[in-house]
Amino acid sequence: MNWDWTVVLQILNTAILVILGLFLRSYLPSYFRKKGENQATKEDTRDISGLDEGVRSAIQEIKSTRDEYLREQRNYLLKFYDLAVEFYYEKLAVSFGDIIVEDGKPLVIFQESFHKNVIELLKSYQRIVVYFDDKAKVRITSEKFLLQAIKARKVMKKYFGRIKTTLIHEMNPSTMADKVEYRKAVEDSNHEEDKYWKEMKPIMDEAFDDLRQYLTALNEFLRPEEIPNVPKGMFSRDA
């Protein structure tokens, strides 16, 4: 079970205040009685002051710990969002025709970047798991997007090798010099890409919806009604 440490810290804060209240309830009457009788000593006053400073210090420490915890929650959520946006617009939505093939190196770089992005999403999601329980909207929606990214990676591994081969052949100068060979190479490339997109397109659509839901959950966590200039959860499918 994952604890909501924000609640835990609030409970500790309240507990300290209750203890302080009980102590003061039992201690102050005798103090003021003595003071009224001019019998309150410097030690009494010093004890009260020391207790007050100790409680203030304890409360401040709890508040600092809570604030740091909230900052870490926020940072990890925003990190996942940045990675998710990058994955959707720079990986899933990329047309292979927009990649300059040359000797194939850009395709290799894209393939490696695709896999790396999924791994970074996975690591970022694990941070969310540490900071949020399984009923938190941000955790549920981030997991849904991550699952689509993992599915996309499987499709990538299944088809991209063949796509890479056909595109390199299509852009080869000797192929382009022969009209018949070039036409066939283009058809082969289109055929491989069609198979890829047939499986990837439903994943893209689901990933878009999941990303929208995550942004909405993120905005709810950040309380946009209290924070100016925070988007309300809608964005375009186009980069």
Image (spheres, rainbow, N blue to C red):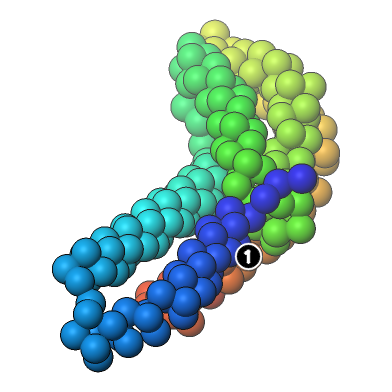
Look at the picture and state if 142 lies above or below 42: above
Instruction: Give neighbour class at mark 1: few <14, some 14-19, many 20+ (Cα, 10 Å).
Output: many
Position of 162 relative to 140 (above/below): above
Instruction: Please identify the quadrant where the N terminus is shown.
Output: top right
Outermost bottom residue: 36
Q: Which amino acid does label 1 sit on?
A: Ala
Q: Name the residue under label 1.
A: 217
Residue 75 placement (x, y as % from top left): 45, 49
Say how many tags the image has: 1
Q: Give the quadrant of residue 114.
A: top right
Please indicate, yes or no, whether residue 103 appears anywhere in the rendered image. Answer: yes
Image quadrant in which you'd find residue 238: bottom right
Question: Residue 29, relative to residue 183: is it above or below?
Answer: below
The percent coordinates of residue 65 (x first, y second) are: 42, 52
- Is residue 107 visible in the rendered structure shown here? no
**Horizontal arrangement in the rendering, residue 214 relative to residue 102 (left or right):** right
Residue closest to the eye, 200 or 130: 130
Task: Determine which quarter of the picture holds residue 212.
Answer: bottom right
Q: Left or right? Give the position of 114 relative to 210.
A: left
- Side of 25 relative to 164 (left or right): left
Under circle 1, the secondary element is helix
Q: Residue at x 20, y 71 (%)?
A: 41
| Residue drawn 70% across the image and 22% down it | 160
Q: Residue sitting at 70 percent across and 16 percent down? A: 161
> Which residue is pictured at 70% across the width and 59% down the height?
136
Front-most of 46 and 221?
46
Q: Position of residue 26 (x, y in %)?
A: 47, 76
Vertical placement of residue 125 versus 9, above or below: above
**In front of the other: 99 or 18:** 18
Residue 134 x %, y %: 76, 51
